[in-house]
Image (cartoon, helix red, strand yellow):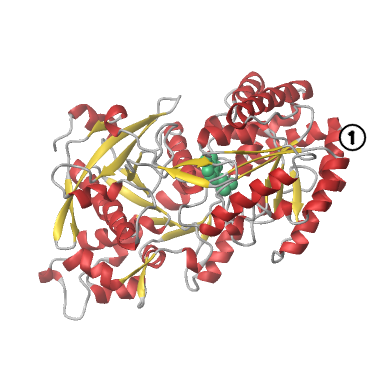
C-alpha cells in the first residue's frame, strides 16, 4: 500500500460503491465528457458527496478531451483537440497496474480528483491514464481521446476502464461492496471480477465451472442507456482474443456476451443482479430489447446545486432553505412570490442574451420569448423538426414573435449530424428577418446552464422511443423553464399539459409529419399566446414546473433509490 495514510483514512476507510463510467463531467475546464452520459455521472458524484454516500468513481483521464467545437459562418463544424493537463489540477497516485494488451502489458497510472460537496461530503474520482514512460507511444495515446479512434482503440480503452479500473482499486486497497457500471463501456469490469473470484482448480468439481457467477452478479449493478440494438458496443471476438489473450476464455465469454460478437450490454446484463433503465418508458423498451431480463426503472435526475442558476439559487435560499440538499422542499414553490420568480428569470435571461451577444454577435430582445434547443446534434434528436415547414414557421413568428437559441456538437464521425448543423445555419440565414436566432458553439456545462436558465421554453423533439431519458429539460425545470417536448424519456413522467409544459405529438410512434404539425399547433395556439396574453398564468406555469418537476427529477431522489434498491439490497 503505497498511498499516504491520510488518503487512506479519508477515502478508503470503509467499503465503497465503485462507480464506473467512460465519461464524467467533473468541472468546467476538465473536458472528460461528451454529453448526457457524462453529465449524469458528474451529477451522481456530486449528489453522492452531498449525501455522504461512500462512493468512489473510476473513469478515463481523456487528456485531449472530446473535442472543442468551432463553427464557420456556414455552420461547418471544425473540431479541435481540447487538451487539459491533469498534472496541473490533480494529484498522481503512486499505485500503477498492468492490463493485457496484444501479448504485452500496458501500464495504467491514475490521477485523483476529489469532489467536495458544500456539506463536506467527499467523493474521490480516479482517472486512469496510460500516458506514462513505461508504455509505447501507441499505448500512451489510449487514454487521450474520448470516443476517438477505431474499433480496436475503443476496445482497448474499455480494457483500461474495466480491467485497469478494477485492478487499480484493488492495488489501492479500496474495499468495494458494490460495482456500478454506468452504461456498457465498463462491462469488462464484470469479466475481470469473474476471473478474480474464480475458484482454484482443486476446488472445482468435474463438470462444474470455476467461475462464481452468483458472487459476481451480486456485486454488480448495471444501468443501460441505449434503447436500440445498434447503439450497443459490439466487438469481434478476433479482436477480443488478440487483445486479451489468455484472459478471454472464449467459450464462457461467448455464453455471456453473445455468439457472434462481444456485446458489452449483454455481458453487463448477464453479470449484474440489478439492471435498470433511466426512465420508466426506457425500462419498458429495454425489457422488449432484452427478453428474459428484469430491467427496472430509476428515472434520472440532475444535481440541484449545479443546475439552478445564480438568481434561482438566491430565490430558493430566501424562501426554501435547505433546498439544495433536500430538493423535495421545492414542492412548495407555488408559494414563491410571482414578482421574485419573474425577476430571477429576467436576470438569467439577460445573462444568456449577453452570452449570445458576446459569442455570436446576435442581439436578442428580453421582451420576447426565447425557445432553447441544445443537445447532441444527431438525426434521431431531430433538431430540424421545427424547420420542417419554413412558411408555416415564418407565419407563426410574424404573428407571435419569438427567438431561438441552439447549441450542440455532432460526433466527428456523424456526417448526418454535421449536415444538420449546416442546415440549421441555412435556415437561420433564410429566416433572419422574422426569427432572430443564434447557434452557440462548443456546448458544455457552462453553456448549458446559461441556456436552460435563460430561455423561456425548452424544446425537445426526439424520435420516439429513442430518447432514453434526457436531462436538459430537468435542468430547465430547476430554473422555472417549462418544456415543449415529444412524449419520450423522462417527459412521459414529467408532463402535465399546461401545468409543467406541453406535449408535442402523442405517445404513439413518432412521425415527422404529424409531430411537426403538432409542434406548430402547440406553439401558435397554446404556448406563445399564453406567454404574451396571460403573464400571470405563465408565472404560474413556471412555479408549477419547479414544484412538480425540480422537486422530483433530481439526483438526490435518484441516488436514494440506487442506494436502497441496488447498492444495499
Ligand atoms: C445536460 C447536458 C446534456 C444532455 O442533455 P439531454 O437533454 O439529455 O440531451 C448534454 N450536454 C451537456 C453539455 C449538458 O449539460
User: Is 449 above or below relative to 493?
Assistant: above
The front one of 8 and 242 is 242
Q: Secondary structure at mark 1?
A: helix
Using the image, determine if residue 108 lies above or below residue 10.
below
How busy is the neighbourhood of tag 1: few (under 14 within 10 Å), some, or many (20 plus)?
few
Task: Using the image as rendered, state which of residue 254 and residue 154 is in the foreground.
Answer: 154
* Whole-percent x, y for residue 213 in the image: 29, 66
In this rendering, does residue 568 appear at all? no
What percent of the width, then of the height, locates residue 243? 22, 64
Q: Position of residue 447 (x, y in %)?
A: 55, 34
Going by the image, does 188 lie left or right of 104? right
Direction from residue 107 to residue 365 in the image, left or right: right
Q: Quadrant of ligand 1?
A: top right
Identify the residue under disc 1.
Answer: 533
Residue in view at x 30 percent, y 54 percent: 157
Please say if 182 is above or below 127.
below
Task: Locate residue 321: give its quadrant.
Answer: top right
Q: Is residue 232 visible?
A: yes
What's the residue at 78%, 24% (across, down)?
A: 338
The quadrant in which residue 103 appears is: bottom left
Where residue 170 appears, as percent x and y from the top left, is 21, 47
Amino acid at each position: 500500500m503505497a498511498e499516504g495514510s491520510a488518503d487512506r483514512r479519508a477515502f478508503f476507510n470503509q467499503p465503497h460503491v465503485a462507480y464506473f463510467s467512460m465519461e464524467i463531467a467533473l468541472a468546467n475546464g476538465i473536458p472528460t465528457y461528451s454529453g448526457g452520459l457524462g453529465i449524469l455521472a458528474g451529477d451522481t458524484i456530486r449528489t453522492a458527496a452531498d449525501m455522504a454516500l461512500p462512493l468512489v468513481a473510476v473513469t478515463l483521464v481523456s487528456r485531449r478531451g472530446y473535442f472543442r467545437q468551432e463553427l464557420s459562418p456556414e455552420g461547418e463544424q471544425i473540431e479541435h483537440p481540447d487538451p487539459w493537463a491533469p498534472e496541473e489540477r490533480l494529484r498522481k497516485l503512486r499505485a500503477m497496474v498492468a492490463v493485457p494488451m496484444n501479448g504485452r502489458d500496458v501500464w495504467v497510472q491514475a490521477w485523483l480528483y476529489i469532489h467536495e460537496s458544500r456539506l463536506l461530503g467527499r467523493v474521490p474520482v480516479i482517472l486512469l491514464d496510460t500516458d506514462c514512460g513505461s508504455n509505447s507511444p501507441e499505448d500512451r495515446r489510449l487514454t487521450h481521446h474520448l470516443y476517438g479512434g477505431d474499433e480496436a482503440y475503443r476496445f482497448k480503452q474499455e480494457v483500461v476502464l474495466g480491467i485497469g479500473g478494477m485492478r487499480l482499486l484493488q492495488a489501492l486497497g479500496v474495499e468495494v461492496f458494490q460495482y456500478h457500471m454506468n452504461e456498457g463501456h465498463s462491462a469488462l469490469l464484470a469479466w475481470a471480477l469473474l476471473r478474480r473470484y474464480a475458484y482454484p482448480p482443486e476446488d472445482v468439481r468435474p463438470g462444474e465451472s470455476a467461475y462464481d457467477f452468483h458472487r459476481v452478479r451480486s456485486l454488480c449493478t448495471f444501468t443501460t442507456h441505449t434503447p436500440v440494438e445498434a447503439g450497443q458496443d459490439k466487438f469481434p471476438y478476433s479482436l477480443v482474443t488478440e487483445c486479451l489473450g489468455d484472459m478471454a476464455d472464449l467459450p464462457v465469454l461467448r455464453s455471456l456476451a453473445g455468439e457472434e460478437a462481444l456485446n458489452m450490454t449483454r455481458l453487463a446484463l448477464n453479470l449484474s443482479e440489478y439492471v435498470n433503465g433511466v426512465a420508466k418508458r426506457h425500462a419498458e423498451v429495454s425489457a422488449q430489447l432484452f427478453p428474459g431480463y428484469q430491467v427496472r426503472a430509476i428515472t434520472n435526475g440532475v444535481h440541484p446545486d449545479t443546475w439552478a442558476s445564480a438568481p434561482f439559487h438566491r430565490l430558493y435560499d430566501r424562501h426554501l432553505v435547505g433546498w439544495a440538499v433536500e430538493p423535495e422542499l421545492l414542492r412548495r414553490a407555488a408559494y414563491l412570490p410571482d414578482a421574485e420568480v419573474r425577476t430571477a428569470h429576467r436576470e438569467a435571461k439577460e445573462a444568456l442574451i449577453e452570452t449570445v451577444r458576446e459569442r455570436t454577435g446576435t442581439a436578442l430582445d428580453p421582451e420576447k420569448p426565447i425557445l432553447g434547443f441544445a443537445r447532441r446534434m444527431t438525426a434521431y434528436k431531430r433538431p430540424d423538426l421545427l424547420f420542417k415547414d419554413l412558411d408555416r414557421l415564418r407565419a407563426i413568428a410574424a404573428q407571435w414573435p419569438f427567438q431561438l437559441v441552439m447549441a450542440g456538437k455532432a460526433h466527428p464521425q456523424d456526417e448526418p449530424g454535421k449536415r444538420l448543423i449546416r442546415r440549421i445555419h441555412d435556415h437561420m440565414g433564410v429566416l433572419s428577418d422574422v426569427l432572430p436566432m443564434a447557434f452557440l458553439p462548443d456546448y458544455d456545462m457552462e453553456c448549458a446552464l446559461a441556456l436552460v436558465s435563460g430561455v423561456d421554453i425548452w424544446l425537445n423533439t426526439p424520435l420516439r422511443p429513442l430518447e432514453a431519458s434526457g436531462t436538459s429539460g430537468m435542468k430547465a425545470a430547476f430554473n422555472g423553464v417549462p418544456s415543449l417536448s415529444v412524449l419520450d424519456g423522462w417527459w412521459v413522467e414529467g408532463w402535465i399539459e399546461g401545468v409543467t409544459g406541453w406535449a408535442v405529438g402523442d405517445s404513439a410512434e413518432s412521425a415527422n409529419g404529424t409531430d411537426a404539425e403538432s409542434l406548430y399547433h402547440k406553439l401558435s395556439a397554446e404556448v406563445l399566446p399564453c406567454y404574451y396574453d396571460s403573464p400571470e398564468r405563465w408565472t404560474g406555469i413556471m412555479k408549477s414546473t419547479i414544484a412538480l418537476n425540480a422537486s422530483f427529477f433530481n439526483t438526490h431522489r435518484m441516488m436514494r433509490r440506487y442506494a436502497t434498491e441496488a447498492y444495499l439490497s
